[in-house]
Image (tube, rainbow, N blue to C red):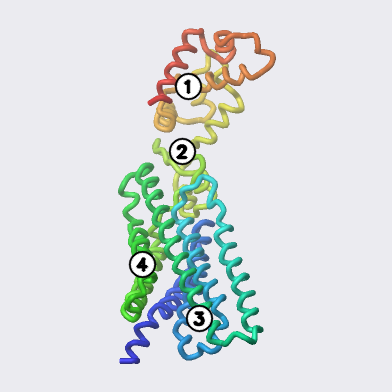
Amino acid sequence: MELLKTIYISLPMVSSLTFGMLFAIAFRQGLTKTERKARKLLCIYFILMSFVWLYLQIYTFYDHTLKYFAPLMGFMLQINQVVFYHFMRILSPVEKNGPKHIEFHYIIPLMLLLASGVFMISYIFTEQLSDNAIATLFLPYVYLSSLFFSLYYSIIIARRIILYKKRIIQEYGEEKWKPMRWIELVVWLRVIFAVLFGIKLQVYHVYGFMAVLVPVQHIIIVYYMLMKSYTILPFGEKNALLVGGGEIITVYNEQLHEDPNIQEELKKEVQLLSRSEFEDYYKTYKPYLNLSFKIIDLVEYFKINRTYLSGFINQVYGVNFSQYNNLWRLKEVEYLQSLPEHKGKNQEELALLAGFNNPRSYWRAKKMAEQTKTN
C-alpha cells in the first residue's frame, strides 16, 4: 500500500521529468521566433515542476535540512506560475505591442525570495528561537503565497484565453479556434487544481487528485504543442499577395519574415504583386494626381493581367479602381491643408490640386468615404 501511495504521489515529478525531456528532444527546427520562445518557456516550466515535486517528495525524510530552503521552495512555486502565464501569453496574443510589463511579474517573486531569505537568515542566527519555529512560520508562508499565485494566474490566464478566442473567431471564424480547444481544457484543469490546493480539508484525498491532475495537464500540453495545434495570430499590418492564377493570399507582414512554413509555401507560388508593393507605388509616384491616369497604366507598370489587378483592388480594399484613387486624393487634400502655402485656399481648390476632376467629384468621394467609415 505504501509503495502504491509513493508511486501515486510521484506522478507529477515523473511526468515533469519525462515530458520535459521529451519536449527538449523533440525541439525541432522550422519554428518561428515566437514558437521557439514559447517552447523554451515550456521547458523551463517542466524543469521547475520537477524540482518542486521532488522537494515535496523528499521533505518528509529530510525535513530537518529542507525546512531551511522554504523561501527557495516558495519562490519556485511562485515563479513557476509566472513562467506558465508567460507561455500562455505568447500562445494567445491580445496586445498590439506584445506582452506588456511581463518583467514585473518576475520581479515580485524575486522580491519575496529576497525578503523571506533575509528573514530565514535572521531566524537561523537568533538563539532564542527553536528550529521548530522555522517550520511553523515559513511553511504557512509557502502555502499561502503559492495559493495566491495559483489562483491569481489561473484567473488572468482564463480571462486571456476568453479574449483570444473572441479575437480568432472574429477574424477567422469558429473553425480556426477548434484546434485550440485543448487550451480551454488545460485552463479548466489548472483552475480545479488551484481550488483543490486551497481546500486542504482532507489532505490525503486532495493531494491524490492534485497528483493526477498535473500529469494529465502535461500530457495534453506536450501532445498538442508537438502537433503544433495552435494559432498564434500576430499583430500589425496584413499584407495581400497576388499569386499566379489570380489567387490572393492574405498574411501578416510578421509572418512573411518569421514563419518558415509560410515562406516555404510562398516559394511554390508565382508572386505577381503584394499589397505593400502596390501601396509603395502610390506613395512614391502619386499617380492619382494625373487626371489621365487609368488602370491600364498600372497594368503596364506591374506587368499584370488587367482582370487580376482589378480583382486585387476589389478584394483587398473593397473598392474599384476609381474609388481607390479617390481615397488617395482625399488623403492628398488633408496633406495639402497642412501646408502653410495652401493656408488661404478652400477645400474645392485643394481638391483640384489633389487630382479630382471637379469639386463635385471631391464632395461625392468624401461623402462615400464618410458613409463607409460609419458602416
Please give the label number shown on residue 64: none
Depth check, mark 2 against mark 4: the one in front is 4
| Numbered badge on residue 195 | 4
Q: Which residue is mark 3?
A: 136
On the image, the x and y values in percent for residue 327 come to 49, 22
Q: Marks 2/3: CA distance?
A: 63 Å
Q: Amino acid at mark 2?
A: Ala
Nearer the camera: disc 1 or disc 3: 3
161 vs 141: above or below = above
N-term mark: 1 or 3: 3
How crowded is the residue under tag 2: few (<14 C-alpha within 10 Å), some, or many (20+)? many
Compared to residue 373, the image places residue 95 above or below, namely below
Residue extending furthest toward the front: 128
User: Helix, strand, or loop for circle 3?
Assistant: helix
Q: Nearer the viewer, residue 247 or 186?
A: 186
- Distance between mark 1 and mark 4 Cα atoms: 64 Å
Closer mark to the observer between disc 1 and disc 4: 4
Which of marks 3 and 2 precedes in the sequence?
3
Q: Name the foreground residue: 199 vs 42.
A: 199
**Residue at horizontal 50 percent and vertical 30 percent from the top:** 303
Cα–Cα gap, marks 2 and 4: 47 Å
Q: Tag on residue 295?
A: 1
In the displayed structure image, the side of residue 281 where residue 165 appears, left or right = left
**Which residue is denoted by mark 2 in the rendering?**
240
Mark 1 / mark 2, whichever is N-terminal:
2
What element does badge 1 sit on? helix
Q: Looking at the rendering, which quadrant does residue 221 occupy?
A: bottom left
**Circle 4: element type:** helix
Q: Is residue 30 visible?
A: no
